[in-house]
Image (cartoon, rainbow, N blue to C red):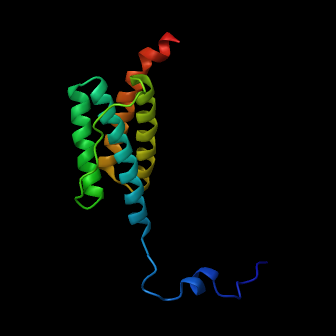
Amino acid sequence: MYEPIRSKSVHRTMAGTTPNFPHRSREEELDIQLAGHLAALLAVTDELRALAPSTDLDTAAERLAAQVSRLRGGRAPLRASTATADGAPTLHQRAHALAGRALVVAASRADTAAAILAAERMDAHAAAEEPVSAAH
């Protein structure tokens, strides 16, 4: 029913066997993606902390920074130092979306610690959005 592939892969012939060609495993790619999502969530969390300081956000920022450092081989993430012009409701919506993306990647790579942290942040930002959503 199906014919076997008779020619060599274009990818194999283009890359050849040169050791200079970067090869990353699926796990490494997921680590990079997860670290990026968590770093973005950390930046939004820092912005929220600048607008309305709270111990919950302080704790979340510390935990997020620790996870990003772990995924990046010990390199500390950059931190936001000032708030943007966006208000808290917009930042909570952005943080909720970023936490959701991080949760998907963490679940994909079976990273329980990062998945739990992302789910907790989703819940916290959803709860922070509720009074705003109910008013409209």
Residue at 34% in and 40% down:
43
- Residue at the far top: name it: 135
| Vertical side of 19 occupied by 80: above or below | above
How far from the left and from the top, in percent, is residue 131? 42, 15
Q: Nearer the viewer, residue 106 or 74?
A: 74
Residue at 28% in and 28% down:
50
| Vertical side of 20 occupied by 75: above or below | above
| Vertical side of 20 occupied by 25: above or below | above
Residue at 43% in and 27% down:
86
Which quarter shows the N terminus?
Answer: bottom right
- Residue at the far right: name it: 1
In the picture, residue 73 is in which quadrant?
Answer: bottom left
How far from the left and from the top, in percent, is residue 103? 41, 45
- Give the left or right position of residue 23, taking residue 74 as reference: right
Q: How many marks?
A: 0
Q: Nearer the viewer, residue 13 or 106?
A: 13
In the picture, residue 5 is in which quadrant?
Answer: bottom right
